[in-house]
Image (cartoon, grey):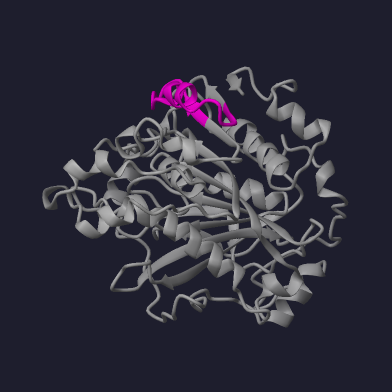
C-alpha cells in the first residue's frame, strides 16, 4: 500500500536527521485512567489559582521561582474577529503534554497516547519545549499560565494529525499561529506510527486508529476538570473544531470527515503478511465520522483510493475542506480535487513548497518564513469562516483569493 509520507527531514538539518532516526518517541505516562477520564500526565508549574492570577497580571508575575515573565501591561485584544488572519495575533504560546488512555471499540486492550496542547498565554518567556527530547521549540513555553479566552463562548479548537513516522510537534508553527489568535490546538501522537516505533510493514490498524485518536483527544480536552487552569478561565469549545493533517494525516482528515472504506477493495490485501487482521477488516466497515469536526485541512497528501475506492468520498457531506500542496511535492492533489466533485473543496498549490514545508520546513525553493505567511494565514482564515462562522470581508477575501496572500499560490475552488 502506498505511503503518503516521506520521512525525510529538512535539508538544512542533516545532523538532526541522524539523531532523530535513532530517537525513541516521547515517553507515555503510566498513570492511566479509563476511557471516561483524562490522565494527569501534564506537569503544571502552578496551582489553578496561581495560574489564573498570573494570566491577568502584568510585570514579572510568575510562580515557581519566576519561571515566566509577563508584559507590564496586558494588551487589550478587543474583538478577535477584527484581527487580520495574515498576521500573527497578540498572544504568545503555552504548551502542555497530556496522556490519554482509551479503549478502541472492539479492542481487547486500552491504548495510551500522548496529546500535545498549545494555547494562548501572555507569558513573554518561560521554559522552552523539546519534542522527542531534541527538537527544540523556543517559541512555546511549557505549562505557561493560559490567557483568558478572547472569543465569546470560549477557546476555539484546532486539531492536528501528524504524518507517517512523525510526531505531534512536526507542524508546531501552525499550532503557535492558532494560539496567537486565541485558539487551542490539540495534537494526538499516533502511537505505533511515530518516529522510532513504526513497524514494517505498517499495520493496517493505523488506518482506523488515527481517527479514533482524534476523537479520544477531543474527548479528553472536553473532559478536563473544572480545576484545570484552561477550564477555570473559560470553556473549550469542542463542539465545532477544525482538523488539519500533514501527509498521512491527510488520511486522518478524510476518515474523520466520514469517508467510507471500500472493504471489498481492501479484503484481498488484508493478510498477515501485510499486517492486517480480520479485526481490522471488520473495523473498516465502520464510519469514523466525528460530528464535532466540521471542516478539514489536508496538507501534502491526497485521498487514498486503494482504501476508499472511487466513491468513498461521497459519504462526506456538509464538510468543507481546504487542501494544500506544493509544486515540489507531487502527491496527487490535482486528482483529489478533480475526483471529489461536487463536495466543497478548495485547493491551494504553493510554488516551490516541498513535503516538509507543511511541517519541519527546510525546503530548497521556498523560505520557512512563508510557512506562516501562506499556510498559517490561509488555514486560520478558513477555520474562522467554517468553525466560527465569520463572514467578514477580511476573512472571505483571503479564502477566495481576492486579497492575495502570496504570488506563489495557485487557487482552485468550488
Quarter-wise, where is residue 3 in the image? top left
Query: What residue is rendered at 87% in x and 55% in y?
Result: 76
Q: Is residue 338 visible?
A: yes
Q: Quadrant of residue 348?
A: top right
At 68% from the left and 25% from the top, the residue drawn is 405
Residue 55 spot, x, y in % from top left:
76, 69
Looking at the image, which residue is at 73% across and 75% down? 232
In which quadrant will I find the C terminus? top right
Q: Percent from the top left, x then y, of residue 366? A: 51, 25
Residue 287 placed where, x, y %?
43, 52
On whether residue 344 falls in the magenta region, the answer is yes
Q: Is residue 197 visible?
A: no
Asked if 249 appears above or below 281 in the picture, the reply is above
The total number of labels drawn is 0
Residue at (29% x, 44% y) in the render: 263
First to last magenta residue range: 324-346
- Left or right: where 251 falls relative to 298: left
Closest to the observer, 393 or 69: 393
Figure check: 189 above or below 335: below
Indicate left or right for 224 with 340 as reference.
right
Please state which of residues 115 and 18 is positioned toward the viewer in this rendering.
115
Q: Quadrant of the N terminus?
A: top left
Q: Is residue 213 above or below residue 362?
A: below
Image location of residue 349, percent across then percent down: 52, 23
In the image, 288 versus 83, the foreground residue is: 288
| Magenta stretch contains residue 17 | no
Amino acid at each position: 500500500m502506498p505511503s503518503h509520507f516521506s520521512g525525510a527531514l529538512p535539508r538544512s538539518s542533516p545532523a538532526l536527521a541522524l539523531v532523530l532516526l535513532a530517537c525513541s518517541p516521547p515517553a507515555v505516562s503510566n498513570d492511566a485512567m479509563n476511557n471516561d477520564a483524562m490522565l494527569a500526565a501534564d506537569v503544571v508549574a502552578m496551582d489553578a489559582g496561581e495560574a489564573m492570577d498570573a494570566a491577568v497580571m502584568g510585570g514579572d508575575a510568575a510562580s515557581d521561582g519566576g519561571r515566566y515573565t509577563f508584559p507590564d501591561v496586558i494588551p487589550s485584544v478587543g474583538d478577535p474577529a477584527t484581527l487580520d488572519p495574515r498576521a500573527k495575533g497578540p498572544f504568545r504560546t503555552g504548551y502542555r503534554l497530556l496522556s490519554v488512555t482509551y479503549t478502541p471499540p472492539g479492542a481487547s486492550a486500552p491504548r495510551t497516547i500522548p496529546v500535545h496542547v498549545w494555547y494562548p498565554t501572555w507569558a513573554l518567556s518561560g521554559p522552552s519545549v523539546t519534542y522527542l527530547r531534541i527538537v527544540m521549540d523556543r517559541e512555546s513555553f511549557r505549562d505557561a499560565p493560559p490567557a483568558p479566552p478572547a472569543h465569546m463562548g470560549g477557546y476555539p479548537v484546532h486539531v492536528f494529525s501528524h504524518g507517517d513516522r512523525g510526531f505531534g510537534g512536526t507542524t508546531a508553527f501552525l499550532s503557535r499561529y492558532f494560539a496567537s489568535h486565541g485558539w487551542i490546538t490539540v495534537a494526538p501522537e499516533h502511537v505505533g506510527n511515530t518516529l522510532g516505533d513504526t513497524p514494517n510493514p505498517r499495520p493496517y490498524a493505523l488506518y482506523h486508529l488515527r481517527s479514533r485518536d482524534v476523537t479520544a483527544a477531543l474527548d479528553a480536552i472536553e473532559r478536563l476538570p473544572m480545576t484545570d487552569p484552561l477550564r477555570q478561565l473559560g470553556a473549550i469549545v469542542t463542539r465545532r473544531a477544525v482538523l488539519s493533517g500533514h501527509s498521512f494525516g491527510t488520511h486522518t482528515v478524510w476518515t474523520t470527515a466520514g469517508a467510507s472504506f471500500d472493504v471489498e477493495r481492501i479484503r484481498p490485501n488484508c493478510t498477515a503478511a501485510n499486517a492486517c487482521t480480520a479485526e481490522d477488516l471488520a473495523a473498516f466497515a465502520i464510519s469514523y465520522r466525528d460530528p464535532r469536526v466540521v471542516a478539514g485541512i489536508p496538507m501534502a497528501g491526497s485521498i487514498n483510493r486503494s482504501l476508499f475506492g472511487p466513491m468513498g468520498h461521497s459519504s462526506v457531506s456538509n464538510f468543507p475542506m481546504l487542501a494544500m500542496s506544493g509544486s515540489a511535492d507531487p502527491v496527487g492533489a490535482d486528482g483529489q480535487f478533480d475526483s471529489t466533485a461536487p463536495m466543497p473543496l478548495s485547493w491551494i498549490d504553493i510554488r516551490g513548497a516541498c513535503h516538509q514545508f507543511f511541517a519541519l520546513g527546510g525546503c530548497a525553493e521556498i523560505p520557512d518564513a512563508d510557512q506562516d505567511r501562506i499556510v498559517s494565514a490561509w488555514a486560520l482564515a478558513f477555520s474562522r469562516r467554517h468553525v466560527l462562522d465569520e463572514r467578514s470581508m477580511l476573512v472571505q477575501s483571503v479564502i477566495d483569493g481576492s486579497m492575495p496572500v502570496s504570488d506563489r499560490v495557485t487557487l482552485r475552488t468550488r
